[in-house]
Image: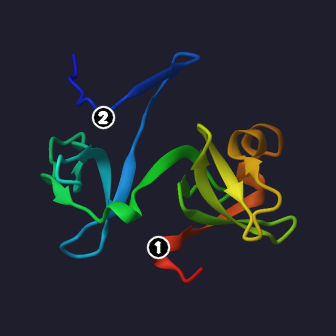
Amino acid sequence: MKIMSMNQIIIRSNMKQHMILFRAKRLDNGEWIVGDLLHSYEGGAIIVPITEKDGSSGGAFSINPTTICQFTGLKDKDDKEIWEHDLVKNTNSGTIYEVIFKNAAFILMEPENIHNMPLYLISRYNRLTDICINFGSKFDKEV
C-alpha cells in the first residue's frame, strides 16, 4: 500500500485516479518545480516533488507564491500538459486565452474578459486536444 501525503488528493471518477499537482517557480533559481503544495504559518509556500518510480526525490523547495499553478488534468493537441495560468491558443479562431481557476472550475479567459468558457465544456464538446496549443505560462511570457 502506497502512503500519500495530505496534498496528494485522489479524485475517483469512473475508476480512474488523478493526483492533484501544483507547480511554481523556485525562489533559489527561478525554475519550475512540480509536486505537492504546502503552506507555512509565516505566509510562505513550498513544493515537495513527487517521488519518482525509481525512489528518487528532490526534497522541498521554497517557491514564489505568486507563481503557483494547478494542473488541469488536460493536454493540448501536441500532448503538452495544460496548467493554470498557461496561455493557450484556439487554432480555429486564433484567440489566445489564459487558463484560470474561478468559481470551482478551470476557465479559458479572453484578454478582454468578454467570453470566458469553462474548460470542462471545451474539453468535453470541442475536443480541446484538437483545437488548442499551449504556449506556456504567463509567468514565462509578457502578457
Tell me which colouring the rendered structure shows.
Answer: rainbow
Answer left or right for 87 relative to 123: left
Answer left or right for 26 relative to 67: left
Q: Quadrant of the C terminus?
A: bottom right
Residue 7, numbered label: 2
Give coordinates of residue 52: x percent, y percent.
24, 44
Amino acid on which disc 2 is placed: Asn
- Callout 1 environment at 10 Å: few (<14), some (14 to 19), or many (20+)? some
Residue 133, relative to residue 143: is it above or below? above
Answer left or right for 22 relative to 53: right
Q: Residue at x 54, y 69 (%)?
A: 136
As helix, strand or loop, the secondary structure at mark 1 comes to helix
List the residue tagged with mark 1.
139
* Of residues 27 and 131, the one drawn nearer to the viewer in this rendering: 27
* Of residues 32 and 67, the one drawn nearer to the viewer in this rendering: 67
Amino acid on which disc 1 is placed: Phe
Which numbered disc, 2 or 1, marks the residue that appears first in the sequence? 2
Q: Residue at x 54, y 61 (%)?
A: 85
Q: Residue at x 77, y 49 (%)?
A: 117
Give coordinates of residue 55: x percent, y percent.
15, 41
- Callout 2 environment at 10 Å: few (<14), some (14 to 19), or many (20+)? some
